[in-house]
Every structure is written in C-alpha cells, then in structure tokens.
Image (cartoon, rainbow, N blue to C red):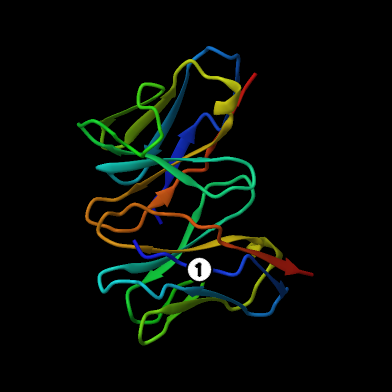
Amino acid sequence: DAKTTQPPSMDCAEGRAANLPCNHSTISGNEYVYWYRQIHSQGPQYIIHGLKNNETNEMASLIITEDRKSSTLILPHATLRDTAVYYCIAIGSARQLTFGSGTQLTVLP
Amino acid sequence: GAVVSQHPSWVICKSGTSVKIECRSLDFQATTMFWYRQFPKQSLMLMATSNEGSKATYEQGVEKDKFLINHASLTLSTLTVTSAHPEDSSFYICSAHDRGEETQYFGPGTRLLVL
C-alpha cells in the first residue's frame, strides 16, 4: 500500500470548516483513499473513502486531486466532538490497513 | 455503517494468566477480521489477520503461540493473550469487513492491564 503523509496537528475553530490534507504521491491505480478518525480511547471510526472522484456523505467530503497524488478531507462545520486523530490510508486489494501517525485535529471553542 | 463489538471493554489480570477477547460483527458476516494493538501515544499496529475457518496470518514479530486467534464463525473472532505479562498491557482493537465490501469497521477496543 502507498505511504501517506499528513501534518501532525491542526487546529480549527468550532463551526468552521476543517480541511485535512494528505499526500499519497505513490498511490497506484487500484488503491482507494480511506479516512478514519480515532477519538481518544476508542476504536477508529470510518469516515469516507474514494478512488478518483470526489465523495460526500453525512460526515464529510473527500476531494481527490486529478493526479490522485493528494487528497483533502473536509469537515464542513467542525464541532468540539470532531476533535480526534484523523488517519488517511491508501489501501489496495490486500485490505490490510497501515496506520501512520495521522493528524491530531483540535477543534477550539 | 456496520457494527463491530468487542468484549470485554477492559480487563485487569495478574501476570501469568490468560485473557480472551471477543470480536463480533453484529449485523454482517465477516470472512476476515483483523487484530490491532495500540500502545499509548502510538498508532495502531496490525497484529494478525483472522480468516474464518483457517489459520490466522501473523505480522512479523508477533508471537503466534502467545496471541492465539480463533475465527470459528463468520461473526466471531477471538484473541487469547496467553501467559500475559505487564508488557502485554495495551489497547487491543479488532476490525472486520462485510463480504464483498472493502470498508473495514472497527470495534470499540479492549484495554488490557496486566499487573
């Protein structure tokens, strides 16, 4: 699976959009981009995934660049409960998730 | 989304005892489940892949005789930490995906403390 790179931490004001970037420059054509988040002392929570088209669900939007070398997770209206570590993972057919360090998002009141 | 449960949510045991952790897919059938371990302030590390009806596949450095995995049904996988020692104290998390789907769903985790 392709390696991903994320900033270690970000802050966001409550009510504002949180934009979390991820670089995956070595991603291959059959690898999906998945986003999970982990709130302290809980198991990871699935957020969204995509292959090459932008995706949106009730939690977030995923914007993937045309060359697929990077993506951005957007939480449109961040709340305090969105404070968590966010993981961007590229996964292929092996289905094994390799977790990096992720981005610690802190939503500030 | 699909729901995965774990039991117990936390356990404290004496050194030398064995501890069993259950992982269940509640509303779907999972041919494959995964077991992770997470130490404080670290990311999740894959320990093993559990396949229904066959032997688990362990990651390099994970002792298969110490961490026994059984995946006897499409909805249940168990991880037994045998002869637990204080260094086995960690947060153990399982995940599973529905047949035909790519997305993995995680359980809430089990916190193990070995005294």
Q: Residue furthest front?
A: B61
The amino acid marked with disc number 1 is Thr
User: What residue is at 54 percent from the left and 50 percent from the top?
Assistant: B43
Horizontal side, residue B86 vs residue A47: left or right: right
State the residue in front, A21 or A44: A21
Q: Residue furthest bottom?
A: A66
User: What residue is at 51 percent from the left and 69 percent from the top?
Assistant: A59
Horizontal side, residue B60 vs residue A107: left or right: left
Q: Position of residue A2 (x, y in %)?
A: 37, 65
Within 10 Å of the Cα at label 1, are there few (<14), some (14-19), or many (20+) other Cα atoms?
some
User: What residue is at 29 percent from the left and 51 percent from the top?
Assistant: B98
| Location of residue B32 with respect to B20 vertically, above or below | below
> Can residue A62 be seen in the rendering of this structure?
no
Q: Quadrant of the C terminus of chain B?
A: top right
State the residue in front, B45 or B54: B45
Circle 1 residue: A5
Q: Position of residue A74 (x, y in %)?
A: 54, 77
User: What residue is at 35 percent from the left and 58 percent from the top?
Assistant: B103
Helix or strand or loop: what does disc 1 sit on? loop
